[in-house]
């Protein structure tokens, strides 16, 4: 018979008693009064918070949506068919969170972060709340870096900057998703994380987007969040907020740049309307609830170019590791060194940085420098998509989102029917950031392109009357037709911005006037090949070009481009 060592037993019991901590897990418990169509009414959760997660008996979670006098309206984030009246509901004390981190890149997930691509679970221990407060004015800085979409008509006339919100709006089948996907594909090598949020789309359409991104290698830096048309309305409603939270991780934790596409917010608004009507919230215009504007504004206001933070550090400090507590000068008196236990000065934004360089740094003496705090100054760029009905941009949701965003790209069905793709209507498309979001060379050559095309459209309408035109007017028309051909572009074929600059320069400066309209596309392809193979030094010059004005030697800086075009013209094979 085995013997037990009483000393060992006593020591184990003593250790267990020492480590014992009395914990009381108190949760509110309620009962389901009614359930259906993705919502449930619950009685008994009197202390639940708005937006708090609740858990049903079968493990499915819900979100406290309506706090009423005698019950709580809960939207169910999953299959509501497994929930029955009378079953138990528990509060969790947590707000809705989603998994975030580098492990999400390359994956297709639902709005709760659950994988939908069959590649196994996502291993991450980092979570972010779905709803978060947008940064204030002091926490931002002006947008001044471009997001190159690779689309000539956009990068030249309605440029998008990092931290901007640019609406893509148009009827069905006008190429809205194609523009967004092209923009994602063109971010290869740009050190930007992309999040594509598909809301209410057919699953077959989402698969097509995924396959195209995978073929082009764009899934290496992209996350797809999908709430398909077959998914419950609550998932479609929270999808854009979840996608934004996944992008914000890279902005706030890594100081990186991100691009978020919401495709499309019209369907999210319809899902929110459905939930609100089921919850018996008062309907307003077009039966949307009164806070539908807030639903979109609180999402899009989270897009921002965050202010960079700077500190004065010793000259030999490693700038890749600089933290906000590394500042050597006093926060109270920045012109003096800080004392023990005293906080260091942190400079926020470009104006503060300039003040540090001109005033505080010289007073501290030699051996110091101004360094950027690692992980500061990220950006979140938003491309919301809105679908219009018969071109009605004055409808409720389109006007709401137009007023929230920093510009819109309007796609005209008539242009698409005429074979002009992308079908961007330059007349009402606008970017409120403008030239700040363009490289200097593009800003110089495309500054008058929008007005030239608008004048061309007027002349084209006038010429259809059969009126005789003078030579100058006919020449303007001919150049306009060729510029339209230059701006045409096949889907999923984004173009490098330097190539865009060179071909637009050739068109606006009249080098295509003697080329037949139907041969402009061939001329473009052969010219770009010629520049890449025989004039690479000219491409490098255009890349580094700051202005088209004359240099120190008195020669125009773009003279090499003119010479290259002249050399190519005899080689063009029609």
Image (tube, rainbow, N blue to C red):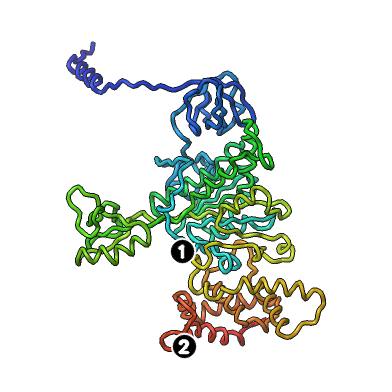
Can you name the residue that lies furthest to the top here?
1
Answer with left or right where residue 574 lies relative to residue 354: right
**Element assignment for label 2:** loop
Quadrant in which the N terminus is drawn: top left
Name the foreground residue: 44 vs 248.
44
Q: Quadrant of the C terminus?
A: bottom right
Residue 212 horizontal/vertical position (percent): 58, 56
Q: Residues within 10 Å of mark 2 (few under 14, many from 20)?
A: few
Quadrant of residue 508 in the image?
bottom right
The CA span between labels 1 and 2 is 29 Å
In this view, the residue farthest toward the front is: 333
Circle 1 sits on which residue?
Answer: 145
| Location of residue 94 in the rendering, given as x and y in whole percent from the top left corner | 44, 32
- Residue 219 visible in the current orientation: no
Sequence order check, earlier mark of 1 and 2: 1
Toward the right, the furthest residue is: 466
> Measuring 72% from the left and 81% from the top, which residue is drawn there?
473
Is disc 1 in contact with disc 2, using a CB cutoff of under 8 Å? no
Taking depth in this image into account, of 265 and 339 the one nearest to the observer is 339
Residue 342 visible: yes
Asked if 113 appears above or below 567 in the picture, the reply is: above
Image height of 260 relative to 459, above or below: above
Which quadrant of the view contains residue 156?
Answer: bottom right
Q: Is residue 273 left or right of residue 313?
A: right
Residue matched to label 2? 555
User: Could you tell me which residue is drawn at 22 percent across and 65 percent down?
Assistant: 363
């Amino acid at each position: 018979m085995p013997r037990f060592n009483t000393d060992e037993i006593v020591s184990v019991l003593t250790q267990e008693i020492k480590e014992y901590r009395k914990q009381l897990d108190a949760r509110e418990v309620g009962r389901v009064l009614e359930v259906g169509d993705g919502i449930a009414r619950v009685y008994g959760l009197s202390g639940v918070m708005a937006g708090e997660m609740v858990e049903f008996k079968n493990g499915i979670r819900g979100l406290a949506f309506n706090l009423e006098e005698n019950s709580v309206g809960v939207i169910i984030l999953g299959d509501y068919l497994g929930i029955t009246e009378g079953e138990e509901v528990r509060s969790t004390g947590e707000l809705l969170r989603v998994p975030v981190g580098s492990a999400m890149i390359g994956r297709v997930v639902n709005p709760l972060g659950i994988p939908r691509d069959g590649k196994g679970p996502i291993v991450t221990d980092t979570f972010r709340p779905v709803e978060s407060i947008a940064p204030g004015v002091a926490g931002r800085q002006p947008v001044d870096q471009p997001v190159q979409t690779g689309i000539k008509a956009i990068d030249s006339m309605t440029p998008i900057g990092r931290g901007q919100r640019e609406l893509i709006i148009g009827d069905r089948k006008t190429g809205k998703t194609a523009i967004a996907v092209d923009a994602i594909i063109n971010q290869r090598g740009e050190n930007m994380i992309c999040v594509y949020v598909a809301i209410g789309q057919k699953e077959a359409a989402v698969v097509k987007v995924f396959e195209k991104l995978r073929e082009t290698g764009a899934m290496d830096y992209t996350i797809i969040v999908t709430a398909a048309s077959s998914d419950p309305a609550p998932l479609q409603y929270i999808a854009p907020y979840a996608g934004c939270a996944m992008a914000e991780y890279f902005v706030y934790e890594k100081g990186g740049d991100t691009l978020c596409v919401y495709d499309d917010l019209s369907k999210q608004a319809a899902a929110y309307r459905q939930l609100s009507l089921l919850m018996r919230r008062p309907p307003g215009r077009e039966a949307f609830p009164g806070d539908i504007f807030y639903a979109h504004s609180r999402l899009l206001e989270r897009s921002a170019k965050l202010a960079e933070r700077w500190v004065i550090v010793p000259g030999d400090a490693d700038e890749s590791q600089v933290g906000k507590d590394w500042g050597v000068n006093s926060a109270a008196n920045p012109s003096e060194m800080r004392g023990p236990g005293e906080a260091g000065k942190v400079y926020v934004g470009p104006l503060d940085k300039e003040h540090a360089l001109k005033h505080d740094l010289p007073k501290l003496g030699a051996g110091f420098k101004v360094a950027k705090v690692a992980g500061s100054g990220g950006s979140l760029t938003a491309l919301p998509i809105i679908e219009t009905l018969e071109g009605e941009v004055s409808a409720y949701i389109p006007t709401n989102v137009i007023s929230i965003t920093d510009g819109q790209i309007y796609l005209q069905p008539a242009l698409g029917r005429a074979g002009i793709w992308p079908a961007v209507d330059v007349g009402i498309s606008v970017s409120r950031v403008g030239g700040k979001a363009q490289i200097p060379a593009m800003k110089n050559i495309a500054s008058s392109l929008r007005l030239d095309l608008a004048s061309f459209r007027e002349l084209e309408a006038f010429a259809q009357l059969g009126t005789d035109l003078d030579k100058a007017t006919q020449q303007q028309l001919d150049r306009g037709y060729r510029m339209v051909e230059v701006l045409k572009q096949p889907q999923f074929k984004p173009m490098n911005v330097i190539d865009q600059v060179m071909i637009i320069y050739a068109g606006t400066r009249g080098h295509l006037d003697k080329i037949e309209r139907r041969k402009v596309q061939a001329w473009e392809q052969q010219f770009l090949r010629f520049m890449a193979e025989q004039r690479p030094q000219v491409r490098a010059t255009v890349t580094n070009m700051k202005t088209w004005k004359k240099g120190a030697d008195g020669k125009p800086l773009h003279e090499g481009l003119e010479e290259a075009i002249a050399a190519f013209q005899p080689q063009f094979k029609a």
